[in-house]
Image (cartoon, rainbow, N blue to C red):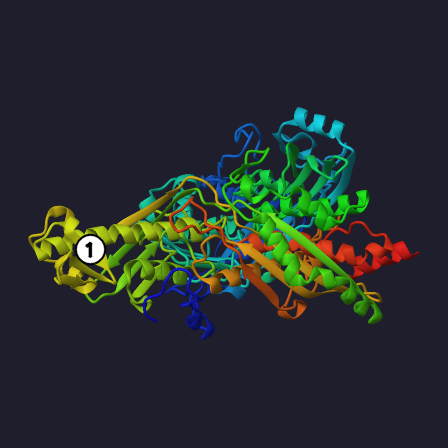
Amino acid sequence: MGIVAIGQAVPRHEDPTLLRGEGSYTGDVSLPNQAYGYVLRSPHAHATLVSIETKAAKAAAGVIDVFTGADCKADGIGKLPTVQMPAPNFDFDSHVRPDRYALATDKVHFVGEEVAFVVAETLAQARDAAELIEVNYEPLPAVTNATEAMRDGAPQIWPDNPGNVCFESELGDKAATDVAFEKAKHIIKQRMVVNRSSANSMETRGTNADFDPVSGRCTVYVGVQGVFGMRNTLANAIFDDEIENFRVVTGHIGGSFGMKNFYAETIMTIWASRKLKRPVKWENDREESLLSDYHGRDKVADLELALDADGTFLGIRANIIANMGAYLSPLFVAHTLLSNGGIIGVYKTPTAYLKISAIHTNTGSTNPYRGSNRPDVAYYIERLIDVAAAEINIDRMELRRRNIIPDDAFPYKGPLGINYDCGNFALDFEEALRLIDAEGFDARRARSEKNGKYRGLGLANNVEGAAGGGQEFVDIALDTDGKVDVFAGTTENGQGHPTMYRQVVSDKLAIDMDQIAVYEGDSDLMAQGNGTGGSRVSSVGASAAHAASEKIIEKAKAVAGHELEAAAADIEFADGRFQIAGTDRRLSWREVAAAARKEGLPEKLQGGLSVNGDFQGTANNFPSGTHVCEVEVDKETGRVAIVRYVAVTDAGQVINPLLLEGQIHGGIGQGAGQVLMEGIQYDAKSGQMLTGSFLDYAMPRASDFCSFELIDHPTLTDTNPIGSKGAGEVGAACAMPVVVNAVVNALAGLGIKHIDMPMTGETVWTAMGGVQN
């Protein structure tokens, strides 16, 4: 491969292994004396557990043991954690958080909740034995819709949360916003539903726990976005044990998107291994995943936009109801309370006020899902602008132009505390319109009309806060053979971290990329790390690799100086060599690495050529961009086809254009999939899931999309030394509003102003029929 530079398009180093089927995932781990676990789940959305009889199951062939909530409580196993994240105007301890243990004890609160855990010699034996467990349920009334759960007389899920309200939070200046609305010439109102969806990663969740009774140490093989956070939580919150007694290893991970977090099944698997003193393996099947994985989105928002007579934005108000499910997920704060400041989008907005109500229902928990709350707020503002333009009869693109934040306004501080450090919003917007040939759209619409299709054009601008704050760690070691080992505290979930880290280190150290190996996802390899999430790795993780590279160069200069009998300050580094300035005396990396192992070095230079590096981010960065697409809607069936899609992205300094394209491509697929077909559905009365398999839960395929036209328009951020911005979620954030805007635009001639997601053929056909009739 040779030496590669930051910004160079380099194919993913990790792909050949995966494409040959040689990846090693949690399910591939099989250990000597392996036992298998199976979870018995509740068939009721809300019920009292009157009794559980496990005698027959324990006597079944191959069964090693059966565990219930009573066993869990007797052993003092800790409850599932919720992460105390700082959020504006929110006191983490001001509300009641329902306790969730690994197995239910007195009641069950959603279909799929864990009731018992069977461990047997084979998975088939564990499944068969689970059918012999006799559970006496006393069904209770259930509620699955958050707005219905708030009504008087709705089933009460938790006694300490009257009205099923877990917490309420306000953000912004209500008084100032009310004044702005009083002065407004136009007030636009729209209710929007952001549908519940499932991450549906290609690899389902699983855990294989291997407890060593001699050392008292448990090795946990599990796909999770942060091995150190998992290790620390297991020790401190669940098992009250020493951190050193847990090792967490991920192996390859087949997707996560925020979903692979902390779960009851992982606790049960580890607990069973510790009790039985042998390895125990558990894996979800797809049906179980749809029931028990943390879901995404599920919000209802009543939105208002105030404008003056010229269409200038004066303020925005929102009342957002978030369906939390029966229990709070570990990262519930991010899902509901973070990124709400982004509701102003890329627009000058003097004032804003939001009220967020978090509501319990008899459903699975909701958690951050690709983009967390950022796609939601992008959807609110971009849909609201299109609704406003139609209502006050202003061209929707012109309305955006009048309000977009100009280049000379940066840094721009929004009314809800968010601070955009840089960007080029207007240029991205105009470039997207040029690339899609917006002026020629009417002719294309006429051609589609002749073919029995309604054609629509949608556009959405977006800016989102990527997690540029926080600390990350990267260690680098260089051996005498010239090989470089890079250890990162992040966790690869399929994004291409190994390629990115190798590229940053190759660029900084001027070392052949093929000489560099990257290691992630093993808590024994490093002292600490903060994992993956919020699009943080390309900024914070890459910057930690950048810092470690600079640190090892400085150490190598000192070693070279000692070897060449010169001061370290006189050593220059260029093109992979260390040279005394003004002379031809120089050493290669290999020679310096060998010198670093010699005796007689000063103490601070001993121990070989290795360093511990870190980067402390101080602020978020703000990737942005504009997406524009065209759709055709079949007049007979309502089926929507995306026929053109252009995305202009500002991700700062692009480390690897191919990796960026992959992230934007995948984000568009997930965002558009949620718009057109995906959606978790529950029966309103029984609480049964109606989309419990891929027969009912539709997943997007490559054939559902056209080719995406992707353009980079970078502005470099100064929040990190590379200038990069997180780009893992910006594609998903823009895709939701742009596709909905395009579909509604296609149907505008029928008088349709809004259709909620998912816009399935049936939903669109029904809306068309309703208007036509």
Q: Position of residue 479 (x, y in %)?
A: 21, 62
> Quick check: 362 above or below 589?
above
Identify the residue shown where x is 54% and y is 46%.
Answer: 103
Q: Nearer the viewer, residue 408 or 610?
A: 408
Q: Nearer the viewer, residue 236 or 720?
A: 720
Q: Position of residue 636 (x, y in %)?
A: 84, 67
Q: How many numbered discs, if any?
A: 1
Say few, some or many: other residues with alpha carbon within 10 Å of mark 1 (under 14 / 14 to 19 / 20 or more).
Answer: some
Quarter of the rendering occupied by the C terminus: bottom right
- Disc 1 target residue: 572
Q: Position of residue 382 (x, y in %)?
A: 68, 47
Q: Nearer the viewer, residue 22 or 9?
A: 9
Q: Is residue 485 visible?
A: yes
Q: Is residue 53 visible?
A: no
Tell whether 222 sits left or right of 305.
Answer: left
> Quick check: 685 above or below 738?
above
Q: Residue placed farthest to the right in the image?
A: 773
Identify the residue shown where x is 58% and y is 36%.
Answer: 414
Say which element carries label 1: strand
Q: Residue placed farthest to the bottom in the image?
A: 20
Q: Residue placed farthest to the top in the image?
A: 175
Displayed quadrant of residue 674: bottom right
Disc 1 marks a residue whose amino acid type is Glu
Quarter of the rendering occupied by the N terminus: bottom left
Tell whether 600 sits left or right of 348.
Answer: left
Identify the residue shown where x is 41% and y is 58%.
Answer: 250
Tell whether 75 sits left or right of 186.
Answer: left
Q: Nearer the viewer, residue 389 or 474?
A: 389
Q: Position of residue 229 (x, y in %)?
A: 41, 46
